[in-house]
Image: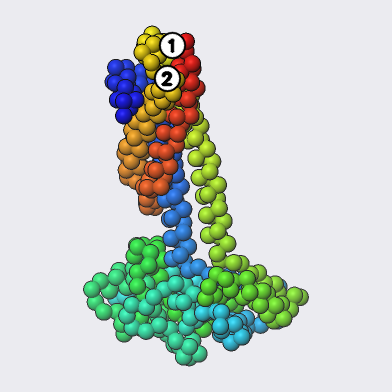
Amino acid sequence: MNALRMALDSIREKKGRSFLTMLGIIIGVTAVLVLVALVSGYNADITAYYEKLGVNKVNVTVNWYDTSRSVDVMDTLYDYGNGELGDMVLGVSPDLSTSLPMKYRTTTLDSGTLYLGSDQFSVCGNYTLKEGRDISAFDVDRRSRVCVLGSYVADSLFQYADPIGETVYFGGEPFTVVGIYYQKDGGEEGSMDDMAVIPYSLDRAILGTAQLTRFSVKVDQSDHMDTVMAKLERFLGETIDTSVGEYELENGNSAMSESTEEMTSMSVVLGGIAGIALLVGGIGIMNIMLVSVTERTREIGIRKALGAKERTILSQFVVEAATTSALGGVLGIALGYIVSMVANRLLPMFTSGTTVTVSPSFNSIAVAFGISVGIGVLFGYLPAKRAARLN
């Protein structure tokens, strides 16, 4: 306690020099907190985005060289996924969409996406039914003109009215609303809630083509992804003649994993840059402490003449360096919070309204403070040792 009191007295006596000594630590700790919080925020945002899309999906793409000899991949893939792979696959649906005006009475939306899906579209697309019913296999077989609306489309077209049973028009074609999905992406224009889905069997009537080339296979858990992909590879190889067309399988989780790895690498790089700032701050502490030892040679001599041992002098200067660095760390943490709050307000202006939460975590604060104290002890030890060995 005596060493801590003496350290605080020394800092108070030379406030200007002490602040300049802390400045490197303040900047370093602020940089560590803000950069790590920024990367963590972006990583959380990316993870949330892919979770909204739905994880554990295998994306299948088919390209036909000769459309006259093409086969109906959808029906065979649907039967295979729900048959032989039924214990590992939750659903199969086309991954087909277009953009058409959506109209109800005098209200028209031009931004919405119209999906053509199977009765398992909601499972594959990670949508949850809120009201009414979902598209059924009967709707697909009978080419029923029914649809399920996303929350944004339902709210925009019907306001507070009940959409179930009403007729909406997609590109001038009438459809009966049979269900509404829960909001999953903010319920805004251009979001994943700005959509509607109809039976994929209406592809020729709506799109003028019956060629389905993209499909989604929803797997029950990530541990089964490799097994399902291997079986799909064999199945499609037997179904599609290589002289007629080709196919491609994509692990839907790979994009999220790659993004997470990229953000982790960026975090390491930015953390290294911030670490350099802390290193510079530590060197500044060591330089000032060496100057302080020189200036206080008389004080050290008197203390040793009165019986102070080397370890007492050593602890005095180590504690002073650690205290200076710790105070710099506290100021850096406070500044980091202020910068984070400012960043939360400014980032949406430069990221097209995308919300990224920049909030330093408790772990990053604890690590930053611990590093600041550790730097004070590490870089303060040499000057302290020199002071303790003075004759």
Between 360 and 307, the one nearer to me in the picture: 307
Q: Which residue does the image show at 36% across and 18% down from the upper left? A: 17
User: Farthest residue toward the front?
Assistant: 307
How did the renderer colour the structure?
rainbow
Which residue is identified by label 1?
A: 294
Furthest residue in direction left, as rendered: 160
Query: Pointer 2: what residue?
Result: 309
Viewer-nearest of discs 1 and 2: 2
Q: Position of residue 120 (x, y in %)?
A: 48, 81
Q: Amino acid at mark 2?
A: Lys
SS at mark 2 in the image: loop
Q: CA distance from mark 1 to mark 2?
A: 18 Å
Estimate the x, y position of residue 149 in percent, counting from the top left. 37, 75
Q: In this rendering, does residue 125 appear at all?
A: yes
The amino acid at mark 1 is Thr
Foreground pick, 195 / 48: 48
